[in-house]
Image (cartoon, helix red, strand yellow):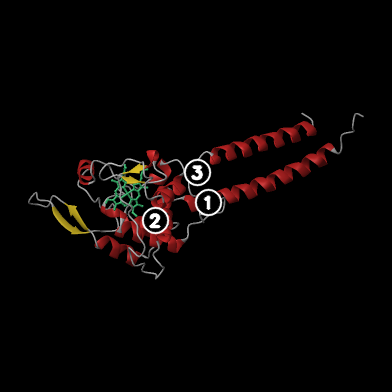
Amino acid sequence: MNQNKILKFTVISFLVFFFCGKVYSASTDLLKVDWSFTGLTGKFDRSSLQRGYQVYKEVCSSCHSMKYLSYRNLGQKGGPEFSLEEVKAIAASYEIEDGPNSEGEMFTRPGRPSDHFKNPYPNDNASIAANGGAYPPDMSVLVKARPGGANYIYSVLMGYEEKPADFALEEGVYYNKYMDGNKIKMMSPLSNDLIEYSDGTNASVDQMAKDVTTFLTWASEPHLEARHKTGTKVMIYLILLATLVYFSMKKLWSRVDSEK
Ligand code: HEC
């Protein structure tokens, strides 16, 4: 391949990838947020993660479990980074069932950082029975499991509207602009000033939706920051390597006489 061909090939591949990306993202009409964690160097906003945990704890955790998380994860690097003392206090605020003891009986004790997040229901059937036949999905990896990821979760939380006049809704079903078929069996979980943020931030629906979505994104991808860091290093390395190869090639071939 001569240089001209290589250049054409590169430009065409770039355009194909670029337009495929465009077509794909144009097919979803979710609300879009300029999240701090997207992009090659994206990082989580630490205070948003901490507030997001507060929203999960005070609102969502009464129905949605997050069974793959342990309280100690809340103190890990790249996450909400609560201090060890805070993590211990958070864990201890839960009553965890343990046992059996030497008499063969189950007992409860205050939670420890190594405990998994407490499940709001004893089992999935109980959660379905308590929610009018709908299963409140576990949120440990929900952001990864849904097309649209963070924007999807945010859109569902912001998507409650008055139903159109001719739209039929059964008892216990609500109109939501972004759900499949515009129906959801979860009442809008957020309303302005529903909680009081411990850092004093104004708890608007939009703010809580953004914070809890940020928290759920971290839960789905706890190593996102480390991955972005490695990615950036690899890119810098590749650029340096490519430059070096280019100049060595130029130098080597400069000794060969051109045929023309
Ligand atoms: C009263 C119980 C309850 C509370 C509180 C609650 N949810 Fe739900 N949630 C449900 C149920 C039940 C469903 C399943 C709805 C369905 O399938 O139609 C659901 C579904 C969802 C979905 C759609 C998931 C999917 O399958 O695509 C999202 C997103 C969601 N909840 C987020 C939240 C967030 C965030 C909070 C806290 C701010 C929260 N929920 C609080 C009961 C609840």
Q: Type of residue at label 1?
A: Thr
Q: Please identify, in this view, whether the residue under mark 2 or under mark 1 is nearer the observer.
A: 2
In three-dimensional space, the C-alpha distance between marks 3 and 2, rounded to whole angstroms, equals: 21 Å
Depth check: give the residue in front, 221 or 152: 152
Residue for point 28% across, 65% down: 89
Rendering coords of residue 77 (x, y %): 43, 58
Q: Residue furthest bottom?
A: 200
Q: Quadrant of the N terminus?
A: top right
Q: Quadrant of residue 251?
A: top right
Residue for point 7% across, 51% down: 103
Rendering coords of residue 20 (x, y %): 59, 36
Name the residue carrying label 2.
212
Q: Type of residue at label 3?
A: Asp
Asked if the beta carbon under badge 2 is closer than 8 A to the nearest atom of ligand 1, the reply is yes
The reply, left or right, for residue 29 in relation to residue 14 is left
Residue for point 43% across, 49% down: 155
Identify the secondary structure beneath mark 3: loop
Q: Residue furthest front?
A: 165
Rendering coords of residue 82 (x, y %): 38, 63
Asked if the beta carbon under badge 1 is closer than 8 A to the nearest atom of ligand 1, the reply is no
Q: Which label belongs to residue 112?
A: none
